[in-house]
Amino acid sequence: MNYKGKAHKVGEHIDTDAIIPARFLVTSDPVKLGENCMAGLEPDWVKRVAPGDIMVAGRNFGCGSSREHAPIAILGAGMPVVIGHSFARIFYRNAFNMGLLLLEVGDAVDSIQDGDTLEIDASAGVIRDLTNGAEISCPPLPASMAAILGRGGLVNYVKERLQQQ
């Protein structure tokens, strides 16, 4: 799984209400949720994002409530991956279940600046910052997780498996 896009940095301890505020939880439509992604942090933040761009987060990203809408909003905004220092555990699980790739890189996240162009080879566990030449290693994405992500999340993965039986 390879990705390339512009980095959009957000801070530390960003909770799910900042990712998608409760007032927008009247739908589960990814496009509608994506239009309001990060509105709890900064109104119109998402207007800087192009499809394929990459969110880069500090410590404890996705803390707070366990709403599945948060990873759906990020995907709906066109960002298929979040690189972070660390993630709240329930958000981590929800993200993969919804089809959003998370890469946890610890302090190495500090080498990425807002606006840098990133290239990711998730299968190899390599993140290249094409702007500054830095290369960050992370655990390679296991084949089982790649299979879930490749089908757009756990529900689609299970449906496909059941249809094959």
Image (tube, rainbow, N blue to C red):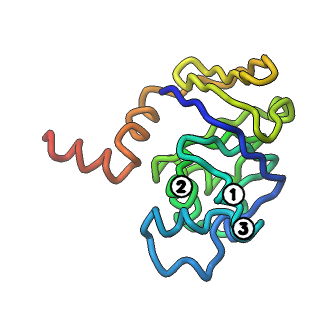
| Callout 3 amino acid | Ala
Dot 3 alpha-carbon crowd within 10 angstroms: few under 14, some 14 to 19, many 20 or more: many
The secondary structure type at the circle numbered 2 is helix
What element does badge 1 sit on? Answer: loop
Front-lying residue, 5 or 65: 5
Number of numbered discs visible in the structure rendering: 3
Task: Point out the tag, 2 or 1, that comes first from the N-terminus.
Answer: 1
Per the rendering, the mark at residue 62 is 1
Question: Which quadrant of the figure has residue 151?
Answer: top left
Q: Establish if 59 lies above or below 66.
A: above
The residue beneath circle 2 is: 94
**Residue 149 image position (x, y, % from top left):** 43, 40
- Does 54 sit above or below residue 33? above
- Upstream in sequence: badge 3 or badge 2: 3
Report, in whole angstroms, how far the alpha carbon at label 2 lies from the one at label 1: 10 Å
Query: Can you tell which mark lies on residue 18?
Result: 3
Amino acid beneath label 1: Gly
Are discs 3 and 2 less than 8 Å apart at CB? no
User: In the visual, does 117 lie left or right of 99?
Assistant: right
